[in-house]
Image (tube, rainbow, N blue to C red):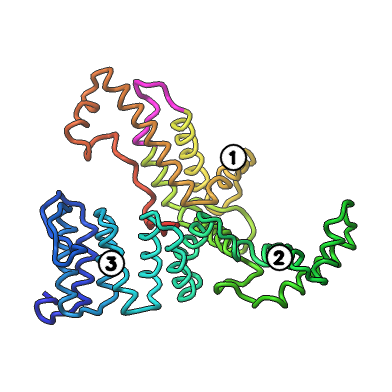
Amino acid sequence: MALALVPSPSTCNNLGIILSAIPSPSTATMVPSLQGGHQAAQAPMGSALAMQYYTHGLTLDSRHPHLYTNLGSLLKDLGYLAEAVRMYEQAVKYNETFDVALANLGNAIKDMGRVQDSIQWYLKAVRASPNFVEAVCGLANAMAGVCDWRARDGLYTEIAVRWRGAALANDDVAKQIFHVMSRGRRPTAHEYAGKLRQMIGYASALSPRETDGVDKRRGWMNRVVEIVDQQLSDGRAWARSLLLTEPTDGVGIARPTSALIWFLDGLCRLLPQATLAPASPLTRFLHSALTLVREVSDFGAEALPANTARSWAYLARQVRNEGGWAMRLVERAMIVLQRQWYWDVQQRKSSALDALTNPHNSVYQRPALPTGMVAPLVPT
């Protein structure tokens, strides 16, 4: 309706993004050709419709970088790498600092086997957005793929490179430092520290503070490590306070929430203890954990009995990483449910046979995550 009232390339772009994510059967469509015009292809119906909206948007604005970028990503997903590269090149032509288009162009060129050629685009993406995760990680992987160690590990790699280069070039200062550090005996800690400080000062004076936009004290791989550390930290914080309530005064123990009780109760219903198959360790753990959580919840603010307090303290430590803990339980429960279904099929149990024709209403369906637990960001 919005497109009919006010034709807009941004509206076409938004519609294309939504439609491209819809799973649907394949249908005939037309995709851009390197020779100009279009060529016949097969694509999911949602992708085919998205292609039409992206193409229509470009007729409204032939310089829209987001339309070119999203059309390129769609072509890449359909296997048309060369055509995708052309779309990304058009996007960066009209916006030279569009970090997403630059990184996508680097990815597409690298996927074509031209790793060396992809580095320039990753570098431009990092310069445009130094904290863009996809660009930093893509650059580090591409440079490692062609054994390009420039700025890889920061200042100390720069020192080693310049040290060797200066020594081979008959540099007197480098030779003096190299003599103490490289002679047959192991240098003392005092000699090592003193000469290392000289080498740091010498290397820093010869080169700029930054190499390709990265602080030499950190380097590409250090940036990747920082990114992974941040993603792990974000993962630990996922769904925090959803299953446990920390004491407000900082004293005492955490208490279970209603979401934790609901989650464990749902798992226990799917994995009852009385089944034809032998009870699994996970089933026994879930039922004992549900009993314990209910007992702790019933006590409220009162002091817990010693045995209950010890058991709860042990369980609460496992639940600290709340989102990851819940996800692991769901994945393990799926394995037990699959085993239970195989067992029931062998026994010709009606519920197992009905699951073949009506899987969405069966007792073997995937357990639900706790209410209010949103999907985490997907790490690179």
Picture mark count: 3
Q: Is residue 69 above or below residue 23?
A: below
Using the numbered discs, state the Cα–Cα distance from disc 2 to disc 1 in whole angstroms.
63 Å
Q: Amino acid at mark 3?
A: Arg
Q: Nearer the viewer, residue 148 or 314?
A: 148
Which of pointers 2 and 1 lies earlier in the amino acid sequence?
2
**Mark 2 lies on residue:** 165
**Mark 1 lies on residue:** 311
The verdict on residue 104 being magenta is no
The verdict on residue 277 being magenta is yes
Residues at discs 1 and 3 in contact (Cβ within 8 Å): no
Q: Name the residue located 72 percent from the left edge and 72 percent from the top edge.
A: 203
Q: Residue furthest top?
A: 347
Q: Is residue 350 above or below residue 71?
A: above
Give percent across and percent down for residue 229. 57, 58
Q: Which residues are magenta?
A: 268-280
Q: Amino acid at mark 2?
A: Gly
